[in-house]
Amino acid sequence: MSISVSNINKRFGSFTALNDVTLEFPSGHLVALLGPSGCGKTTLLRIIAGLEKADSGEVFLEGVNASKLHVREREVGFVFQHYALFRHMTVFDNVAFGLRVKHRDLRLSDAKIRRKVQDLLQLVQLDWLADRYPAQLSGGQRQRIALARALAVEPRVLLLDEPFGALDAKVRKELRRWLRQLHDELHITSIFVTHDQEEALEVADRVVLMDHGKVEQIGTPDEVYDHPASPFVYGFLGSVNLFHGRVDGQELRVGDHALQLEAHDLAHDASAIGYVRPHEVQLLVDDGEVQDGLPAHVLRIVSSGALATVELTRDDGEHVEVTVFRDYLRQLGVQEGDRVRLKPQRIRVFPAESAKLATPQLAAA
Amino acid sequence: MAAATTSVICAISNIFFSTPDASRRRPATSEAFWVRAVLIALALAFFGLFLLMPLAAVFAEAFKKGWSAYAAGVVDADALSAIKLTLLVAAIAVPLNLVFGVAAAWAIAKFEFRGKQFLITLIDLPFSVSPVISGLIYVLLFGAQGWFGAVLEAHDIRILFAVPGIVLATVFVTFPFVARELIPLMQAQGTDEEEAAVVLGASGWTTFRQVTLPNIKWGLLYGVILCNARAMGEFGAVSVVSGHIRGRTNTMPLQVEILYNEYNFVAAFAVATLLALLALLTLGVKSLIEWHAADGGQQNAFIERGEK
C-alpha cells in the first residue's frame, strides 16, 4: 500500500519541525528517512501514523486522505525506539494485545488468536520466550517482539522509529539484516527513521535525506551516495574532503594547482568547493618527478582491519583524509612524515556559499 | 529503625574487629567511628523521645485503669458514633480523591496544555494552606452569612455543622495525596506504552484499564493509603466545619479532644489508641507496598542480558 504526504507543515513553538514536506512512498518498498537529530524525520513518521497532528498538509494512505482518521483507524503498525512493550504483560499477551482489543464482531476466536501469536513469534524466531516478561529479554529480543506485536494486527504499513537506536552495535547489525530479510518475505510498505547513514544505505530500497524540516534528496542508496544533491548530503553520507578553489573550465584551481572536475554547471571563475570522498583520492609518492596533484605530507596512519586511513596536511595547511587498502599502502611504502601528492579521482563541485549551510564531517577538522 | 540498628551493629563490630591496617583502607564515603556513633545516638534518641515515647504514652494512658475502663471508653455510644462518622467520611472522600487524583495525574502526565504548571501548583494548595483556613473557606461559602448561606437555608439544606461539610473539608485537605503520588510516576513512565496501545486499535478506556492502570497500581495504592490515613486523622479543617455536636458531627480526632478537655483521660486515650493503630496499620501496609514495588523494580532491572 502506498503512502504519500503533501505540503506537511509542523511547528513546535518557534521551532519548525517540518517545512512544506511532500513525499511519495511507493507500495511494497522499505524506505529510510535519514537525517541528523532535529531534522523532523520522527515527527513526519508520527504524523503519518496519526500520533502527531500536522499544522497543515495531508496524509494519503493508498490514495485516500487519512488526515482526519484517528490513529486506531489508520491500521498502521508502529515500532518505537524504546520498544514500548507492555511491561506487565507476557510476551504472548503483548503480541496478542492488538487482536484482543478488536471489536467483538471483528475479533478472532481465542484459539485462532493463540495460533496467530505462535506463528508471529515463530516468524521473529522467539516462540520459546512466550511466557517471559519484557524485563527478562535483551534489547534485541524486545525489539523483535515489538515488531511481532505491530505485525499481529496486519497493518497496511509498517512505521519504525529508530528501531535499532537503543541497541549495541553488533545486535544492531544482525537485526537490520534480519529486518531486510523479513521485509523481502512480507513486502509490507515500510518506513523507518534513522540517523545512521550506514543503516539506511544497507537496509532501505530508497533513502529520503532530510535536514531542517526539508527533504534534501530522494533516491536509491547508490544514487544518494554516488550523486549527492547538496553539500549537506555529501557531508552526511560519510566522510568527505573539501577543496576550496575557483572554477576554470573543467578544472578546479586550488592555489597554483589544477584539479580535473566532473561535469558541472558552475560559471567560470566562480568560487567553489570540491567534495571528494576519502577513498576517491589517489596517493602518489612525491619523488620530485611527479608534478600532478596537491603536495602534502602524511601526519598519521590509522589502521582498522583491511583498510587504513591516512591523515595528511596539505602544504596550504588544509586537512585531508584518504582511505586505502593497507596492502596498497605497504606497496607504496608510504610512512608517517613522508611527502606525497594527492590526486582526487572524482570531484563534485558546489558553489562556495551553499556549503555554509551544510555540515560536512571534515569541514571543521 | 532497622537501618539504624544495623549501622549500630556495624559500628560496634568495626571497633572490635578493625585493625589499624583496615582503618587505613577505609572506603571514601565512611566516617570516623565517633562521628558515626554520635550521629546514630542522636538519631536513636530523637526517635525514642519524639516518636516511640508518645506512642507508648497513648497506650499506657488508655490502659491505666485496666481493660474494662478502656473497653468502656471505646464502646461508648458517642465514641462509636464518632468511629462510624470517621469511616463514612473516609469511605466518601477517599474514592472521590482516587478518581480526581487519577484524572489530574493523567491529564498532567500524558498531555501537553497551557496552564499545566498552574494546575500542578493548584493541586498542592491544600498542602500549603493551614487546615483551619481550609475549613474556614467552607464556612465562608456555606455558613449562614456565607455566599450560598441564604440559598441553602431557603431549600433547607444543611452543609455546615453536618456530614456534607465534614466530607467537603476532608476531600479538600486530602486531595493532593493520590495526584502527588501518581504525577511523577506517570511522567517517568511516559506515553510510549499508551501510544503503542492506541496504534494497535485500543480505545481510550481499554488503554487506561489494560496499560496505564497496571503500571501505576502500586503508586495508586500507596496514595490511597496515605489519603485514607489523613482523611481519618484530619483535625483542623473538620473541627471548623463540624460544630462538635456529640454523637452527630464528631469524628474520632474531635471526640478525642472533647473527652480530653472534659478530663476523661482514659476514654480520650482509648479512642486515640484506635487512631494510633490506624497509623501503625497504614505504615505497615505502606512498607508492604514499597517492598512490593521495589520487588517489581528489581524485576525491571533484571535486564540487559546477552542476546543468547
Image (cartoon, helix red, strand yellow):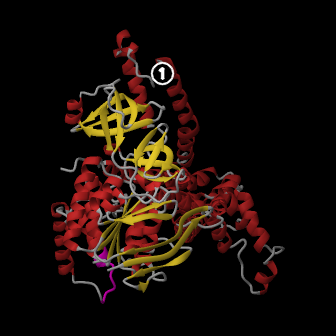
Q: Is residue A297 above or below residue B233?
A: above
Name the residue nearer the viewer: A281 or B16. Answer: A281
Q: Find residue B59 and report its horizontal and vertical position in percent.
A: 53, 46
Residue A129 image position (x, y, % from top left): 19, 60
How crowded pointer 1 is (Cα within 10 Å; few <14, some 14-19, many 20+) is rated as few
Q: Position of residue B14 (x, y in %)?
A: 38, 19
Magenta: main secondary structure:
loop
**Residue at the image position 47 percent from the left and 35 percent from the top:** A318
Is residue A131 on the magenta stretch? no
Say which of A21 and B244 sits in front: A21
Q: Residue at x 43, y 26 (%)?
A: B8
Which amino acid lies under the numbered mark 1 shown in the image of this protein?
A: Glu
Residue A259 higher or lower than B99, as above or below:
above
Q: Is residue A141 visible?
A: no
Of B163 and B207, the residue lying toward us? B207
In the visual, does B222 lie left or right of B22? Answer: right
The quadrant holding residue A133 is bottom left
Kindly tell me whether residue B208 is visible in this rendering: yes
Which residue range is magenta in the image?
A: A98-105
Q: Residue at x 54, y 52 (%)?
A: A270
Query: Which of these two is toward me, B84 or A163?
Result: A163
Check disc 1 and report the residue beneath it.
B31
Number of residue marks: 1
Quadrant housing the N terminus of chain B: top left
Chain of the residue that carries numbered disc 1 in the rendered image: B
The residue drawn where x is 40% and y is 37% is A320
- As drawn, which residue projects farthest toward the bottom? A105
- Element under label 1? loop
Residue positioned most to the right: B145
Q: Position of residue A336 (x, y in %)?
A: 32, 25
